[in-house]
Amino acid sequence: MHSADGDYTTTRLQVQARRRHVCRAAYEPFPFHEEDYYRADLALVSSTLGMPGPTSGHLVMMRQPDQPVLQTTPDTPAMVLVVGGDTLAAIADLVQGPQGILHTRPMALDLLWQVLQRGQEISKRDWRLLRIAVVDMRNNIFIGRLFFGDADSGAVVWDCDCRPSDAVWLALKTDCPIYIKKTVWNLYSSPIGQMLAPEGKTLEASVYKALGITPASPTEQQTAQKDAFLQIRESDPEPVKRLKMEMKVALHEEDYTTAARIRDHPFMKLQAQIQACLSEGRREDAAALEADLHAAIAEAMKPDYSE
């Protein structure tokens, strides 16, 4: 006969023995090879700056060129990511500045950001978001990937699936690079002119209509005016770049009221005056206006402690 205590002891030892043989599956990182990807940037976002955003919209991604490009042409390829809900609102907020708009209650991505920040603070390792990537298209859905790793060595510690739109928000928040797999890009990109001027309409006609310029025979001054509102230059301050992106989206959606509102934004007015001075050779006046623009941006970016 076996005592109850003996049976219990034997059973416990058997369980412990089985536990010792249980092994966790080793972490297998996602196979990322940079030569298989294009670097990309967010070019347009379908939300009106400073206004309540629509429930759905799109992000237009463009490749980083191998050589410097003075301006985008209608034949330049781009890829569209559909976005909606809180993510669209969060991206629209973030493009207005590094911190976005402060809400009384955090949205989902704000909460995720706080968790990541706190995790980094208490972690014994210095890790960060190294890059984000669009890695595949399955069932008409783009698949994104987040890569976290050592901030100094760049070695990936872990990675995970995500929605590309959420990944783009995190990339804007952390200023990390955006990648799109070449096979995905080659299959799903198309000329940006087709996106911005659908149904056989020309891009130039819609642009000039929104800016109050006659498209038939624009003068050199009118062309300079159009470029001041739409041509994104590397030297443009970040808020001006974002305003130009929003202007392009408004034109694409034929929302000329919004386009006019963006055109009349103080930053855009100063930018137009700067380009007008440069086209007329008045470089000192342009430099003074540029200083005014940077001062206005700095003032707008100051935190509001009144509440």
Image (cartoon, rainbow, N blue to C red):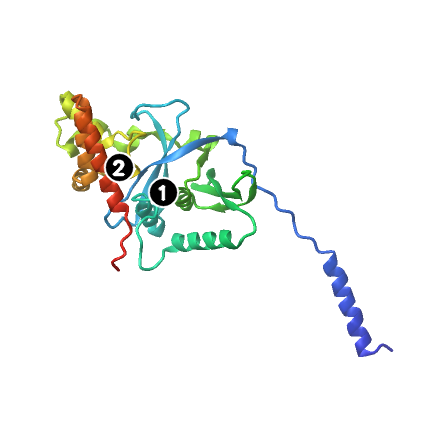
Left or right: residue 219 compared with residue 68: left
> Does residue 94 appear in the picture of this structure?
yes
- In this view, the residue in front, 81 or 61, is 61
* Residue occupying the point 43% across, 53% down: 112
- The residue sitting at 45% across, 35% down in the picture is 179
> Going from the N terminus, do you reach mark 1 or mark 2 first?
1
Q: Position of residue 8 (x, y in %)?
A: 77, 73
Q: Residue furthest right?
A: 1
Q: Quadrant of residue 9?
A: bottom right
User: How far across and down, in percent of the image, does residue 191 sit?
Assistant: 33, 28
Gap in angstroms between the C-alphas marked 1 and 2: 24 Å
Q: Is residue 48 visible?
A: no
Residue 79 at x, y percent in the picture: 37, 34
Residue tagged 2: 240
What is the tally of numbered marks visible in this picture? 2
> Quick one: SS at disc 2?
helix
> Hey, what amino acid is under mark 1?
Val
Residue 167 vs 17, above or below: the answer is: above
Classify 10 Å Cα crowding around label 1: few (below 14), some (14-19), many (20 and above).
some
Is label 1 in a helix, a strand or a loop? strand
For disc 2, the neighbor class at 10 Å (few under 14, some 14 to 19, many from 20) is: many
Q: Nearer the viewer, mark 1 or mark 2?
A: 2
The image quadrant that residue 307 belongs to is bottom left
Q: Indicate the position of residue 221 as horizontal and vertical percent values.
A: 14, 23
Disc 1 vs disc 2: Cβ atoms closer than 8 Å? no
* Marker disc for residue 12: none
Q: Nearer the viewer, residue 95 or 98?
A: 98
Label 2 is placed on what type of residue?
Answer: Val
The label on residue 82 is 1
- The N terminus appears in which quarter of the rendering? bottom right
- Which residue is located at x 74 percent, y 58 percent? 20
